[in-house]
Image (spheres, grey):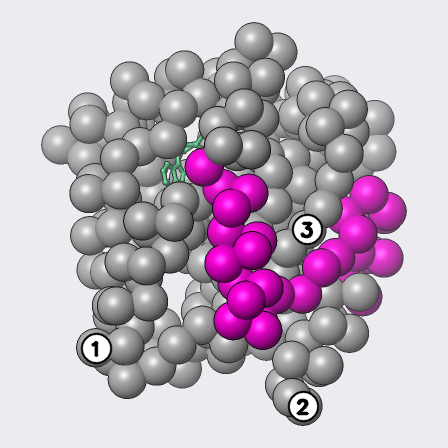
Amino acid sequence: MRLVFLGPPGSGKGTQARMVGEKLGLPQVSTGDILREAIVRKTDLGEKAKPYMDVGDLVPDEVVLPVVEKRIVEKDCMNGFILDGVPRTLGQAIGMEEVLQKLGCAIDAVMFIEVDDAVVVKRLSRRRVCPKCKAMYNLDTDPPKQEGVCDRCRVGLQLRSDDKPETIEARLVVYRKNTLPLVEYYESRGILKRIVGEGEIGEVFDSILGKLSEARSS
Ligand code: AMP
């Protein structure tokens, strides 16, 4: 299956994409992770992306699309993948469609995880990330066993630089303007599945699995 996880920042799409990926044996392709990694490694891609990411803006389509195109033709993506955080603009959606068409395939389903703005702000400001294994914690609902330390890697947890309150607000504005139109785009293609994203992680996961079996049987 070729899936897209769509939703505002903080909707839990990264966490859910990872869980669904593990369950179905599909690689999770997260443009945010790829770009952050490029920034850490100070590559050309990282240098291009950093100024946009620092202020919560979108990295231009012409920078992001080739990165995704290169990733999805890798061997582990042959039988499917989960796109997490991409497409994020109509331009990217159309670009992806063209790329997939050339490969003789298409997106099978889009999981749209809906969460209220107030929940987004609360979740992101309480989110902490392990810089090594990328595990995500929430200080209120899913704290690490030892304060400030990753359960798995034992390294210090960090607040993502774009999870600061002023940047969260900017990201929500960008989301509404650029990404929300994709809901209609995929709905008109009959592949959009709406998920209520405000429950517990396990509940949201179960509801995604339910929608996935619907998508598989249709
Ligand atoms: P994420 O980890 O998905 O929340 O993405 C973090 C940041 O990376 C975003 O706020 C954007 O600056 C950038 N980014 C990630 N994916 C994309 C994309 N598909 N298009 C443009 N910018 C992106």
User: Regarding mark 2 in the picture, which secondary structure is present there?
Assistant: helix
- Residue 140 in view: yes
Which is nearer the eye, 104 or 203? 104
Q: CA distance from mark 1 to mark 2?
A: 25 Å
Does residue 203 belong to the magenta stretch? yes
Name the residue: 67% across, 44% down: 12
Name the residue that disc number 1 marks: 102
- The percent position of residue 182, horizontal first and vertical second, equals 50, 51
Q: Quadrant of ligand 1?
A: top left
Q: Between marks 2 and 3, how big is the CA–CA gap?
A: 21 Å
Residue 116's spot in the image, x, y percent?
Answer: 76, 34
What segment carries the magenta color?
A: 178-206
> Up-down: is 160 above or below 101?
above
- Viewer-nearest residue: 6 or 76: 6
Q: Is residue 10 left or right of residue 81?
A: right
* Residue closest to the far top: 166
Q: From this viewpoint, is residue 21 visible?
A: no
Q: Amino acid at mark 2?
A: Ser
Query: On the image, numbered disc 2 is attached to which residue?
Result: 217
- Residue at 67% across, 90% down: 217
Type of amino acid under label 3:
Ile
Query: Residue 167's spot in the image, x, y percent?
Result: 52, 15
The amino acid pointed to by label 1 is: Lys
Quadrant where the C terminus sits is bottom right
| Vertical position of residue 218 compared to residue 127: above or below | below
Residue depicted at 59% across the width and 17% down the height: 169
Q: What is the distance, in whole Å, between disc 1 and disc 3 at their CAs? A: 28 Å
Residue on which disc 3 sits: 113
Q: Dots 1 and 2: beta carbons under 8 Å?
A: no
User: For mark 1, does the 10 Å Cα neighbourhood hold few (<14), some (14 to 19), or many (20 or more) residues?
Assistant: few
Count the numbered circles shown: 3
In percent of the image, x 32 and y 37: which residue is there? 35
